[in-house]
Image: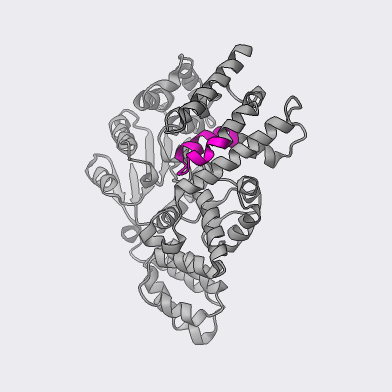
Amino acid sequence: MFCLLDFAGSGKSTVSKHMDREWNSDQKLMARFFFSRDSAETMSIERFCPIVANAFASRDHNFKEVMKEFQSQENYNLLSFEEQFKGLIVDPLKALNRPAILIIDALDECDNAHGHRDELLNIISTQLSSIPHLRVFVTGRPERDIKQWATTTTGVHCTNFLRLEGNHDDVERYIKERLSDLPSSLQAKVSRVVENAEGVFIWARIACDLLCKTVDKQALLNSLGREVTLDYLYTIALEQSIPKDEYSRRAAVMVLGMILSVQSPLSIAELVQLSPNPDAVEAVVTSLGSILLYKDREDPIRLIHATLREFLACATKAGPWFVQLGLGHYNLAAGCIDILIGVTREERGQGFDTIDDTFKRVIGYSWESWGNHCGNSNRKLGLNKRVTDFIDAGYEYLLDDSIRAVSDRFVPVVSLCRVNMSPYITHALLHRSLQWTKVC
């Protein structure tokens, strides 16, 4: 096992993606799992085994056959993580007896609040010796538990970029190329920017984006010539991109709150339909191109780096740009429920053939996520009226959609039962769900 552990923004995921492409082009038997704080699913290990197993299975029919045998067990998905890891990954690889590669990217973003990361690391270290043909490539920040595991576990080689390269030439080349069009009078200050980047690619990228956009390049170069942090760059990016008035700042914080709170990344077109202020969404997202990543209106929006989430969600760091995740969940819950109420009234009995693809995705996201957003909202009482309206609108008509598995139909109900919502609401939801089940 090879662990590349380095600080935020150093380019670990870039290396991981590059190796993924290289090994794929060489037809290697491989799988990649990318942990991310973008959604609850990608923060946990719940989907790790199925995703990795399906990736291997897509490249080898024999792997797929062994995997299917394990999946033929009743309720195999309810087994422990260790049992699924063995049945879906270890046993099929042992049966194949051929070289395989597993990439685990951004391990530090695997949630460890409930010991998930510890469980993953322990199982990998205990099971690895039984699969001699498997090679594992791990990237992540050198968090204390990860570094201790990597440096004390037999068979694990741990390193960082400085040990591998001995310098930061790649980041230096990047900065000099991006800033080559600066006036000659300012070129002398570029070397100071290179020095303060300290090999952190994400710092270099944001700094160059800001310098290319700003009117007062000399003032910003003077700032970047001093030792500055990523948090400082995020603040500059926000202040430079959003108008100074309070209404614009509030709109930006509202949109960022929704982006940080989504269960899975949404596009501009999808957020517009869920937002309490649709007109603000595209204006804010397009203004923040230096810290938000997307290709077009239909492409899911992603943060430029996990440290942006940490910055925005911390009041002491973000200051006036602080994002309350609970408020983001409230806005998303309200938007999801409003979408579903509208569908139950307008589309009841008519099917979804006349709905465009974007709105179909919004309906799907709303149904899968409204319960989760209600549960994580910081204004649960403010949602009670919407939820009861949703129940009265006949939400069970949405369950006729054939693309939904029966096992998923009660997920929002279970989510609400686990949080402090009104007892009347959870009782009414269960009652309506059970009524629908009897009809079916």
Residue 231 horizontal/vertical position (percent): 40, 63
Residue 124 horizontal/vertical position (percent): 32, 34
- Dominant secondary structure (helix, strand or loop) of the stretch shown in magenta: helix
Relative to 18, residue 426 above or below: above
Q: Is residue 380 magenta?
A: yes
Query: Would you say 236 lies left or right of 114 here?
Result: right
Residue 160 in view: yes
Q: Residue furthest left?
A: 152
Q: Residue at x 56, y 24 (%)?
A: 409
Query: Would you say 227 lies left or right of 433 here?
Result: left
Query: Would you say 101 lies left or right of 350 here?
Result: left
Q: Residue at x 37, y 27 (%)?
A: 81
Residue 43 horizontal/vertical position (percent): 42, 41
Name the one closer to the observer, 402 or 97: 402
| Range drawn in magenta | 365-385
Q: Residue at x 38, y 48 (%)?
A: 139
